[in-house]
Image: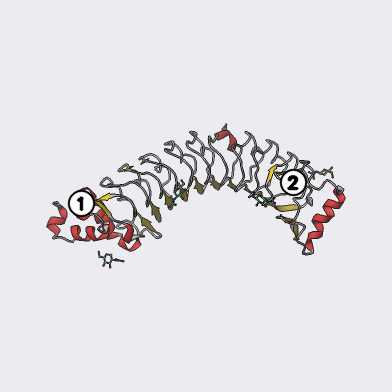
Amino acid sequence: MSRSTEQDQSPGDLVPHLSSALRLMLLLAAVTPSLKACLVRHSVNGNSVACHPPAQPPSHFPADTLYLAVEFFNLTQLPADTLQNVSHLQELHLSSNRLEMLAAEFLLPVPQLQVLDLTGNALAGLPPGLFRASRALHTLVLKGNRLRDLKAEWLSGLKALAYLDLSGNRLWTLPPRLLANFTALLILDLSDNQLESLPDDLLQGPLRLDRLHLEGNRLRTLDKELLAPQPGLRYLFMQNNSLATVAAGAFEGLRELDMLDLSDNSLSSVPAGLWASLGQPARAMKEGFDISRNPWVCDKNLDDLYHWLLANNDTMFSRKETLCAGPEALKGRLLLEVARGQMGRTPHLAKSPIF
Ligand SMILES: *[C@@H]1O[C@H](CO)[C@@H](O)[C@H](O)[C@H]1NC(C)=O
Ligand SMILES: *[C@@H]1O[C@H](CO)[C@@H](O)[C@H](O)[C@H]1NC(C)=O
Ligand SMILES: *[C@@H]1O[C@H](CO)[C@@H](O)[C@H](O)[C@H]1NC(C)=O
Ligand SMILES: *[C@@H]1O[C@H](CO)[C@@H](O)[C@H](O)[C@H]1NC(C)=O
Ligand SMILES: *[C@@H]1O[C@H](CO)[C@@H](O)[C@H](O)[C@H]1NC(C)=O
């Protein structure tokens, strides 16, 4: 392992003045509390090793290590054979280093790995084939790296993936069929990237996605096709984008949505029928919805939304920030109040509202 600080002159040998045996002893000695060594916890199943500064980053681990954390060291690279002798490893946490690349062979020795956390590194890509032995990996966290042009091959080999976190990168586009093989995927987090659009087939593959994070991108439209393959989706986060257009059938396939966040977008209107499958009268949206901080134009084009808002007002978030931006006469009024005013007319008028 090598660190990006001046004092580390010899990558691959972090404690050059100590013999390997001594280094191992230093590591193992950490059962007695010492700030300078890694923490090793023994259990009947195996060891758990956690290293953070001011301890030295280790270069050898006990063979029966199941859990390994080497974090906050600013390591820029790891030797390809780092995991050679920990073949039972199940969890690997390498967050808050400065890793720029991983060797294609890096994970080959650890086919039982279930969790890989690479949060907060400097990865601009992954070597194709990295996961070719990672059939047990269910959690992959690549949050806060420098990924820009994601390649589907980077992820190939993963068979059990349930949680994929790609948030906080520089993704501006996604390849087709990215998730085609991830039938077990439950949570997809693409938040805080620079995505302007998504491939229509993005959600084809997963059999039952539960949670989709798309917030903090630059999405402008939501088409009919995107969500259609995921009728069981329960959480949809699309706040803080540039959505101006949502297709009438965009939510049509959703049967179990419990949470919808469309706040901080550019919606001035939405098409009639958009809400039909969501919330009451079909079923309550358990966790609620947020449509605040959009430039709503409160004219009769919103009648359908008004009806829906009144039926679902008890699960509405940020009411005081859900305002009309137009027309001039209604600027700054609460959308919910305007809805009550419009729909609270006589039934006769409510059926054919006149503005
Ligand atoms: C793995 O074990 C072998 C044999 O004990 C040793 O020579 C080698 O240095 C070890 N590799 C690592 C990365 O710990
Ligand atoms: C890692 O880098 C940060 C920022 O430069 C620095 O504050 C920190 O002390 C470094 N940590 C180590 C273990 O070198
Ligand atoms: C999906 O799996 C098939 C069969 O194993 C393989 O040929 C294909 O390359 C995989 N697709 C991706 C994007 O990894
Ligand atoms: C919106 O997303 C951008 C990243 O795309 C982020 O920098 C910003 O903090 C987010 N704003 C809010 C209010 O969450
Ligand atoms: C929602 O609206 C109904 C009438 O349409 C009203 O009785 C109820 O108090 C409202 N709930 C809230 C939390 O405003």
Q: In the rendered structure, find residue 87 and report the number of the disc placed on it.
A: 2
Q: From the viewer's perspective, tell me whether residue 10 is left or right of residue 253.
A: right
Point out the image quarter for the N terminus.
top right
Q: How is the image coloured?
A: secondary structure
Q: Which residue is at 77% across, 57% downward?
A: 37
**Relative height, residue 106 to residue 93 (above, below):** above
Q: Check disc 1 and report its element: helix, strand or loop.
A: helix
User: Regarding ligand 3, which quadrant of the image does it lie in?
Assistant: top right
Crowd class of label 1 (few under 14; some 14 to 19; many from 20; radius 10 Å)? few
Q: Earlier along the polypeptide chain: callout 1 or callout 2?
A: 2
Q: Nearer the viewer, residue 341 or 226?
A: 341
Residue identified by numbered label 1: 328
Q: Is residue 195 visible?
A: yes
Q: Nearer the viewer, residue 260 or 233?
A: 260
Q: Nearer the viewer, residue 213 or 228?
A: 213
Q: Residue furthest front?
A: 6
* Tag 1: amino acid: Glu
Q: Nearer the viewer, residue 197 or 247?
A: 197
Q: Is residue 257 visible?
A: no
Q: In the rendered structure, find residue 213 and report the number of the disc placed on it.
A: none
